[in-house]
Image (cartoon, rainbow, N blue to C red):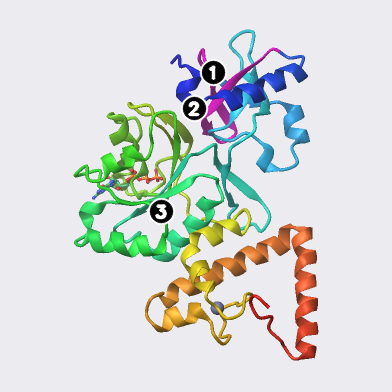
Amino acid sequence: MSLELESLGWGPDLGHAFTVLLSESSLPLVPGRVVRQARGLLSVQTSGRVFLARTAGRLLHEAPGAEALPTIGDWVALQLPSGDGEALLHAVLPRRGVLARREAGSERDVQLIAANLDVVFLVTGLDDNYNPRRIERALAVAWNSGAAPVVVLSKADLHPDVPERVQEVEALAPGVPVIALSAHTGEGVEALRALLPAGKTGALLGSSGVGKSTLVNLLLGEERLATQAVSEEDGRGRHTTTHRELFVLPWGGLLIDAPGLRELGLWGDEEGVDQAFSDILALAEGCRFSDCQHQGEPGCAVHAAVAAGELPRARLDSFDKLRRERAYLARQTDAAAQREHKRVMRNLSRAGAEGARFKRRGG
Ligand SMILES: Nc1nc2c(ncn2[C@@H]2O[C@H](COP(=O)(O)OP(=O)(O)OP(=O)(O)O)[C@@H](O)[C@H]2O)c(=O)[nH]1
Ligand SMILES: [Zn+2]
């Protein structure tokens, strides 16, 4: 496959970054985009062809952490092989953002999912898979990627009242488009297409079996990916997708399909949680105390909204839980946050000694 880099999303900013890199390097480097990742093995599309690539030892050793290493969707600089061998990946060009999660069972380790995304499609099945709290968590993770999240409610053909569900999800995803989609009836496919114009990169994120591969096949117009029906028949129920791949869709949109993720650990700063709960933050503007924690303080507008039935209690609980989780992780990972935590705790105990005064908003 020969492709112009522009059709993979290359633009002037990347061109500039690459020129700077070339001027600092003595190697004959060429630019390309990581279009496939299977365990440690990367495939990079250059303007000529796809090369299998190995990360150069120097990049591996000098990387301050997993976040600095190449992932699918990254723009990279390659040294091409003289013969049939693998290319050497020497550098990752500056990213516009990266979708990452905390590695399962770990407090500090990050796992990159995909880089340089414009849109993150959070796919949830409208069957047993549906779980509003998981959608809220996924939104908090997605907002930190620098891309715009979209909620895709898949298998819409299996639900008796789709408009009601869409409304429910819109309420927990403020400012985020919600698309009900069925690969069986074609409902919602046009709406999804419209959110992924030519040259823009999207990623499908969702647990195994929500229909991501089925959707990619439908958008490609061919059965490129194996879907789960096969493994269900042989009763093993294993995960179908084991690698990540970037697909060029017929209209020029770029879409990354990743293996189903069982859990999405929060990663990144608190901004993601705040953006996912912008409705609660807007309510909090009306709280009497500017530092209101919405834990029963007088004049709390957030609690008033819960009491009035305008904000579901479960959503507020979800916000509290994610905020605590975020703060806990920050204390584990970040020494600066740790010092800040100590400072806050010190101030709290001092305030306690002085008789817990609240600072009034606006003095
Ligand atoms: N009823 C219905 N079933 C669907 C739809 N889309 C997918 N399915 C079925 O859901 C099952 C799982 O679909 P996949 O596309 O393999 O799911 P996946 O998200 O790619 O799963 P992983 O590859 O494990 O991440 C298959 O049996 C599909 O036929 C849909 O729109 N409606
Ligand atoms: Zn409050």
Of callouts 1 and 3, which one flags the residue occurring earlier in the amino acid sequence?
A: 1
What is the crowding at mark 3: few (fewer than 14 residues within 10 Å), some, or many (at least 20)?
some
Of callouts 1 and 2, which one flags the residue occurring earlier in the amino acid sequence?
A: 2
Question: Which residue is nearer to you in this view: 114 or 163?
Answer: 163
Residue farthest to the top, as pictured: 83
Picture coordinates of residue 282, whole percent (x, y) = 50, 67
Identify residue type, mark 1. Thr
What is the crowding at mark 1: few (fewer than 14 residues within 10 Å), some, or many (at least 20)?
many
The residue that label 2 is drawn on is: 9
Residue farthest to the front, as pictured: 363
**Residue depicted at 53% across the width and 82% down the height:** 300
Whether residue 88 can be seen here:
no
Q: Over which residues does the magenta segment extend?
A: 28-50
Q: Secondary structure at mark 1?
A: loop
State the separation of the CA atoms marked 2 and 3. Answer: 23 Å
State the separation of the CA atoms marked 1 and 2. Answer: 12 Å
**Whether label 1 touches label 2, CB < 8 Å:** no
- Tell me if residue 46 is in the magenta stretch: yes
The residue that label 1 is drawn on is: 46
